[in-house]
Image: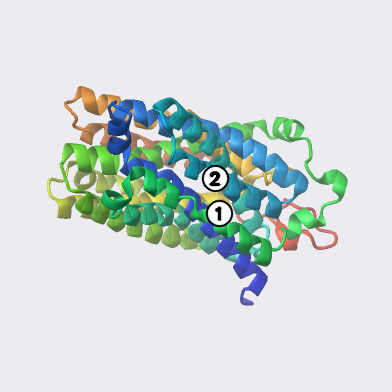
Amino acid sequence: MAGPTSRQKHVVAACYLGWTLDAFDFFILIFVLRKVAATFDTDITPITWAITLTLLLRALGAFIFGRLADRFGRRPTLMANVLIYSVLELASGFAPSLTVFLILRGLYGIAMGGEWGVGASLTMESIPAQWRGRVSGLLQAGYPSGYLLASLLNYLEPVLTWRGMFVVGALPALLVFYIRRNVPESPDWTARRPEERGAGVVEVIRRNLPLTVYAVVLMTAFNFFSHGTQDLYPSAFLGAQHGFAAGTVSTIAVVYNVGAMMGGLFFGALSQRIGRRLAIGIASLLSLAAVPLWAFGGTPVAIGVGAFSMQFFVQGAWGVIPVHLNELSPAAIRGTFPGVVYQLGNFLASGNATIQAAIGERMGHDYSWALAGVAGTAAVVITVLVALGREARDVRMGAEAAEPGVVPGVAE
């Protein structure tokens, strides 16, 4: 197998960093929920609406930026996307009221929603098929990598304050210069005739309606799986319920995000050998074994072990998703389809944080059962859905699909 070219390395690096820094900006909020609530003289539950709005509007962003990527190219769309979410992150740090803060987080959600689908399609269309599993795991490892960066930044919260943390979150804008200088356009998109770019999405979706519905349901379960195990965990579960100091919370978060990155890389690579669905199912089922320590552990060490294991398997399953959705996607709308179905799943799961917070408050600020219930249910549902679904591991795309006589999106 030939080694990666310099251009392919730059594509993978840029898209990994784009998702890392996007996730970094998102996860800053979950560490400072209580501080933001105190600033605006409220409790945690109203602030969780910032998370909900971000997740709700990510679907709109996936559609807008996906259509732009299918029409005008992956590369310029990715640059615009990174710049916009960075500016909105900066503005969030200067919000004068809760209302303005919520509006800004909603707008940020639109920008955040576009990055994953555009970056994933650019990457998968730029690399050989035999790399897809490993690179998929690497791309998705960007999500816990961003969470890890936010965890590390939280050590500085006493100095920066929550507003300063959002200001630091504007730094991803610098990535635009790297993309502009080093990242080429997708060979798949470049090979298409002008009249084929931005094909009618409604018609393509209509022809692939069962696949679209299935993918949205699958991604709804996946988003309950990830956000149900992450969003309230540091601030509400570790901070409010257990009373751990900020340093302890950050340390546990660092530990479980290292586990998440390792899981994504491991199961992404494994999917190249045993198949996408089987790798996802194994990771999902194994996460059930982590629930007792993760949600009911009593000491920082026990909880840390459980959290590492839980995120190893949660993000292990997620590590297969970038390649799985791009391989299933209709080729004509690959810039739009993966991101939209992913973010529609986010839309349908967007109330997770508010639901879990409300359950926890009703149980005397004990969030253990809310966390365990969502994680366990999502793991089982995902396993059933992938067992009923299909995969397209051998589909041709990108430079391979652009060869003369080869129809993009058709398996060998």
Residue at 70% across, 57% down: 396
Residue type indicated by callout 1: Ala
The C terminus lies in which quarter of the figure? bottom right
Residue at 24% across, 56% down: 251
Disc 1 crowd rating (10 Å Cα; few below 14, some 14-19, many 20+) is: many
Image side of residue 323 versus residue 34, left or right: right
Image side of residue 200 versus residue 22, left or right: right
Check disc 2 and report the residue beneath it: 87
Residue 343's spot in the image, x, y percent? 54, 37
Q: Which mark is residue 270?
A: none
Of mark 2 and mark 1, the one earlier in the sequence is 2
Residue 345's spot in the image, x, y percent? 51, 34
Residue at 29% across, 26% down: 41
**Please, what secondary structure does the residue beneath circle 1 have?**
helix
User: Can you say whether 95 is above or below 142 in the image?
Assistant: above
Image side of residue 372 versus residue 410, left or right: left
Residue type indicated by callout 2: Val
The N terminus lies in which quarter of the figure? bottom right
